[in-house]
Image (cartoon, rainbow, N blue to C red):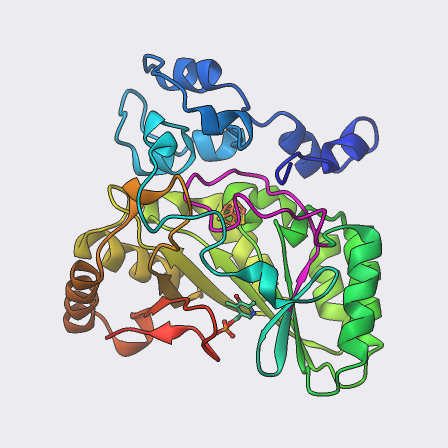
């Protein structure tokens, strides 16, 4: 099962506050609906393998009694997920073909992605890796060690991307260990972290995490993942400011999602808020055609129209790159 959440174990007695918060995340649809004053709808069969998971601080940013709330739609399992739609499969990106070593996805020149953790602090219904067999592909302690051996053996790799799942589910001690191992590889110059934790669980950005980034010789880039401006409250802004102080370059990636952010007003507000927080809008991804996510898809023509609208309204640095991942291409494909 890709999404079983392991790290709560260590939170039981000695964990950091963020680990306690994660342990108390909402996992029950009835409870979520009760918290928001909503009636409970039917559940998809998909929820049995990819269950509801959402931290309470993220729930607190949702509007009560609004079944169309854009944050709620990202996390609530709905019967639409059981629909079978032509072209939507469990591995549209053929990531399993790009496994260069256990725990290592190497598709693009100079950089490779380490599957550092098997779970996330939130289960996003549109997730492109919702069916990914993480553990089988090395998102384990032993897998990370093998992945880094493969990085050490390839002098063309200058950047290691910690991904997952969410690599910030590793605690500071373990993460520090991983960063020291990466640092010991002389041809690696940059560390990139792909994480949604500063958004959904901002308490994860501890002084210890900032110290790890501050203490490394590697240049640090942190790519966060927010899709809607309502995700970006003051706690998130403070967490991002702590990260930036390391220093780290902060970028955001979003997924274009029907009903969540498929409007020029929302996307423009998201970009403006990000820039005010010191974060550069990096990618706006077209949905990967993963089984169970078709109801989130926004067509390419509509997406191009939205991008045009953003370009007319925003400074160039605030316009994200509209991108699609195409298996076999040497980079993400930019659209428009
Ligand atoms: C998206 C991705 C990257 C990073 O691509 P950038 O364009 O550098 O952000 C690296 N490796 C894999 C396997 C990816 O999917
Ligand atoms: S945070 Fe990213 S990897 Fe994790 S469930 Fe959401 S989209 Fe998927």
Residue 197 falls left or right of residue 9: left
Q: How many marks?
A: 0
Residue 57 falls left or right of residue 15: left
In the image as oriented, which residue stretches furthest toward the front?
86
Q: Is residue 300 highlighted in magenta?
A: no
Q: Which quadrant of the view contains residue 307?
A: bottom left
Position of residue 270 measured from the top left corner of the image (x, y, whole percent): 31, 55
Position of residue 253 measured from the top left corner of the image (x, y, whole percent): 43, 61
Residue 196, relative to residue 311: is it above or below? Answer: above
Residue at 52% from the left image edge and 61% from the top image edge: 94
Residue at 27% from the left image edge and 49% from the top image edge: 261
Q: Which quadrant of the view contains residue 296?
A: top left
Q: Quadrant of the N terminus?
A: top right
Q: Is residue 129 highlighted in magenta?
A: yes
Residue 65 falls left or right of residue 118: left
Residue in front for this viewpoint, 109 or 260: 109
Position of residue 31 measured from the top left corner of the image (x, y, whole percent): 48, 15
Position of residue 299 measured from the top left corner of the image (x, y, whole percent): 21, 56
**Range covered by the magenta-colored residues:** 113-137
Q: Quadrant of the C terminus?
A: bottom left
Residue in front for this viewpoint, 201 or 145: 145
Residue 69, relative to residue 202: is it above or below? Answer: above
Residue at 25% from the left image edge and 75% from the top image edge: 315
Residue 50, relative to residue 30: is it above or below? Answer: below
Look at the magenta stretch and give its main secondary structure.
loop
Residue in front for this viewpoint, 133 or 270: 133
Residue 4, relative to residue 90: is it above or below? Answer: above
């Amino acid at each position: 099962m890709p999404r079983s959440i392991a790290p709560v174990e260590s939170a039981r007695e000695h964990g950091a506050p963020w680990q306690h918060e994660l342990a108390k995340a909402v996992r029950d649809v009835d409870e979520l609906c009760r918290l928001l004053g909503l009636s409970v709808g039917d559940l998809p069969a998909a929820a049995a393998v990819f269950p509801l998971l959402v931290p309470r601080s993220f729930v607190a940013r949702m509007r009560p009694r609004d079944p169309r709330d854009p944050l709620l739609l990202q996390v609530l399992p709905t019967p639409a997920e059981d629909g079978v739609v032509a072209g939507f499969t469990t591995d549209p990106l053929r990531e399993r073909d790009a496994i260069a070593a256990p725990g290592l996805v190497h598709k693009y020149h100079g950089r490779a992605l380490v599957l550092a953790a098997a779970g996330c602090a939130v289960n996003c219904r549109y997730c492109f890796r919702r069916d990914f067999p993480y553990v089988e592909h090395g998102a384990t302690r032993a897998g990370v060690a093998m992945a880094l051996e493969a990085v050490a053996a390839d002098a063309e790799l200058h950047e290691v991307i910690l991904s997952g799942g969410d690599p910030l589910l590793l605690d500071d001690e373990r993460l520090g260990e991983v960063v020291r191992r990466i640092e010991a590889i002389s041809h690696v110059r940059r560390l990139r972290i792909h994480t949604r934790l500063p958004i959904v669980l901002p308490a994860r950005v501890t002084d210890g995490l900032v110290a790890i980034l501050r203490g490394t010789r590697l240049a640090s880039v942190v790519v966060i993942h927010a899709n809607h401006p309502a995700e970006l409250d003051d706690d998130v802004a403070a967490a991002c400011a702590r990260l930036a102080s390391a220093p780290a370059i902060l970028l955001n990636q979003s997924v274009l999602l029907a009903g969540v952010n498929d409007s020029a007003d929302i996307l423009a507000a998201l970009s403006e808020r990000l820039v005010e927080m010191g974060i550069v809008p990096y990618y706006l991804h077209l949905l990967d055609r993963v089984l169970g996510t078709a109801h989130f898809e926004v067509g390419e023509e509509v997406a191009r129209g939205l991008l045009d609208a953003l370009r007319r309204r925003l400074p160039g640095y605030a316009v994200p790159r509209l991108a699609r991942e195409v298996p076999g291409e040497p980079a993400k494909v930019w659209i428009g």
